Amino acid sequence: MNERFGFRHAVTACIAIIMVFMFAGCATTPLVKDKAEKFYPPPPEQPRIKFVDYYSDVWHISKKGQTWAESMFGKTEERLFRKPYGIAVSPDGTKVYVTDVQNMMAFDLEKGEFINFADSMGTGPGALTYPFGVMMTKNKKLYVTDITRKRVIIYDQDGKYQSVIGTDNQLMNPTAVAVDEERNLVYVVDSKAHNLKVYNTEGKLQRTIGGKTASFEDGHFNFPSNVMVSPEGEVYVVDSGNFRIQVFGPEGEFRRKWGRVGDMPGEFARPRGIAMDSEGHVYVVDAAFQNIQVFSKEGRTLMWFGFGGPELGNFRLPAGIAIDSSDRVFTVEQVRPRVQIFQFLGRKYWEANQKEKADLERRLGKTFSLVETVEPPPPAADSASQPAAEDKAAASVEQQPDGKAVEEKPLNPQADLLVRMIEVKYGKLSSEHRARIEKAYPDMLLKWGVRVFSAEKIEQVFGE
């Protein structure tokens, strides 16, 4: 009897000790988010953009540790979003605001807590029915468009209602908003009306840019979707139905445009969000390409980053984009919804992070230039049908199976760019494959477009 009692007592004690260690160990175990070092363009080129972080569920915001049950059986994710569209960020990058289906999601990344947007609920003047576009000013006022209420509602950074802009007679379908704080102007994209409404900060309509119907003429729109104002007061409008960006002066005068429908860099299929970094580079999200293209203020194509896919640094139906004062780029996606954060590696960032710059330069074996922060791609196909002489002289060398080096002939500029895009995702291609792409790339673009390449489709072209 005593032996039996002693045995049970020993077993109970062992279980208790195991549970104590389990709880103690798990209580201090932080939630580890899946991250990967990813640069654009990839090494050995000088990086211009790097992936930083992502947020897709409540745990990522709250910064909680795992419980013993979650460490044993896995964590149950509580998704943050349903189908988000717009994103805004406070100037210091600590507060993020995302418009979702019939909801406004806001959280403080520094404190790891959510911001209560109580005034957006219910039936009060600050209530939201279908929030869509969102932006935050330097003085921390949050502007949100509501396509059902046909209004722009203004809050402070903590979600307290301030005022409202627009009436039923003025706005049909407000999808985006931007504010020129220097000139006290508020620009509202009215997508279904095919125009841009300009208000003063008191809510009085000043003028309308564009007509009442869709048009391809300069200064007119076809279902515009987003808008941005530069520090100089220039207004950049995403003219989605016309597959282009239009730029206007502070007085509403048309200045320039770029873009057309297509699958090549500088062209668009479904352009959405737009933003600008501290060096004046213009970022345009394309939901069909599932990437972000970067342009100069004049519309020169500089680079792009991202592919279609669930991996970190790639996108699944991206929509909104916002950039904080430190040049951190915030994006939001609608499929497997999440917010991703990237860093533009420009002069401001490198001057503040000299140690990281030196370490990366050492690893890549090159010194970074801070003058030209983004490099343009090769010239467009219509600029030259034959490679330049210096390009021929600089042709790369590839090893044959027998060990002999052979000269790799330069490709048509469009085919070369297509090859480089494929190589970023699938690795180095052989000379034979490069030649096949040069021969077949017009049909490849026509059938599939750059945005939907897959390993299987490439193999079909290669016949392997």
Image: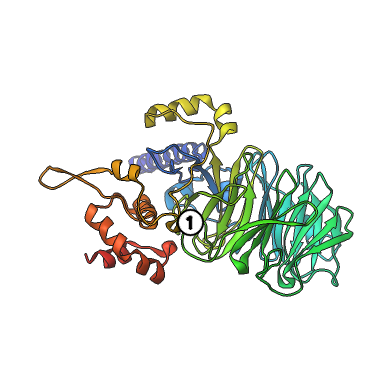
| Residue at position x 40%, y 40% in the image | 9
Q: Is residue 42 above or below residue 263?
A: above
Can you say which quadrant of the picture contains the N terminus? top left
Q: Does the rendering let one see residue 316?
A: yes
Q: Percent x, y for residue 216? A: 65, 70
The residue shown at (55%, 50%) is 300
Q: Mark 1: which secondary structure?
A: loop
Q: Is residue 58 left or right of residue 16?
A: right
Q: 325 left or right of 72?
A: right
Q: Quadrant of residue 145?
A: bottom right
- The quarter holding residue 254 reads bottom right
Which residue in the structure is indicated by mark 1?
Answer: 265
The front one of 395 and 154 is 395
The residue closer to the viewer here, 208 or 20, is: 208
Q: Amino acid at mark 1?
A: Pro
Residue shown at the point (37%, 29%) measured from the top left = 365
Q: Is residue 84 visible?
A: no
- Foreground residue among 335 and 328: 328
Q: Quadrant of the C terminus?
A: bottom left
> Within 10 angstroms of label 1, few (less than 14), some, or many (20 or more) residues?
some
Front-lying residue, 408 or 126: 408
Number of marks in the rendered image? 1
| Image x and y of residue 340, in percent | 55, 49
**Which percent across, then down, holds residue 15?**
41, 42
